[in-house]
Amino acid sequence: MPTSFEIFQALASGLLLGGVYAILGVGFGLCWGVMKVINLSHSTFALLAVYIAYWMNVSLKIDPLVSLFVSTPLFFVCGIVIYRLLIGPLAKRAEELVAASMVLTFGLAILMENAMQWAWKPDPRVLNVSYTGKAFFISRVSIPYTAVIGFAIALVTTSCIYLFLKKTYLGMAVRAVWQNKEGAALCGVNIDRVSSITFGISLATAAAAGVCLSLIFSFNPSSHLGWLIYIFLVVIFGGVGSIPGVLLAGLLIGLITNISAVFIPNAWVNMILFGILATVLLLRPTGLLGQREAR
């Protein structure tokens, strides 16, 4: 039987990791809810932000956190460009945008993965910074600095997205498009502009999520595949378009993952996660806090 110390350690680590899972899913869920686009390259962009942070750290001796001031605005602009060149034209031609967007963004993800393998080789890498491996203690429970920093970035970013949607004119336009696209257009909302900005915000959050994950885990050009699984878990579990739901789902998944690993072999943890997900979908298909409208 695990000791109480091991359980408390798993609780602390799970909560901190869950916040990072939440930020990984926020932009993905926003894109899915507003635009009906399932962006399978979302986690690949998160990984690209990791490699940008790694390159800046190794070549320029810049802290990975500083790279956020480069990758976040860069990815926002890239998101707008990608929407204008690929997603927007596809939306006008495709009868079923969800399926078409999955095919398009899957191809983009494979292209980006191969480009990262060519540029940085397939070897696993880690970000070594001054605070790597350091921690503070609450009683005997170890709290790594990197996990706390990742959680703080995730919480701030998620809160900013929530306040943007609730308190700004553009955010209300995004919510209007989510609730009723045709009605929003009749009220004068520029659907194309709102969609491009939404896609830009989505990729900007992916950059923040990638840097948070790189502080905790090692990475290689195929790491995005494992991250994509957690994106779907968080978004579907919490509810598509629900920021509080995604945050709650991320925290719960982090807790379930870490606590389950204390009691059972790691190979069974994913089975428990998907079993819980299936139960939630049967009892509440919209997710924990999901509704028909963005929240």
Image: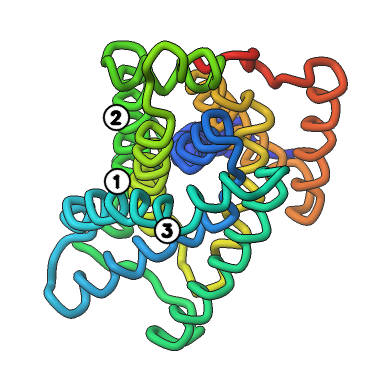
The circle on residue 156 is 2
Residue 151 picture location, percent across and down:
37, 37
Q: Amino acid at mark 2?
A: Val
Q: Amino acid at mark 3?
A: Leu
The circle on residue 145 is 1
249 horizontally vs 140: left or right: right
At mark 1, the secondary structure is helix
Q: Residue at x 43, y 50 (%)?
A: 83
Whether label 2 touches label 1, CB < 8 Å? no
Q: Nearer the viewer, residue 141 or 161?
A: 161
Among the two numbered marks 3 and 1 on one chain, the one whose residue lies closer to the N terminus = 3
Which residue was labeled with disc 3?
A: 85
114 horizontally vs 139: left or right: right
Residue 172 picture location, percent across and down:
37, 15
Q: Nearer the viewer, residue 160 or 156?
A: 160
Q: Residue at x 64, y 14 (%)?
A: 292
Rounded to the nearest angstrom, the CA distance separating label 3 from label 1 is 40 Å
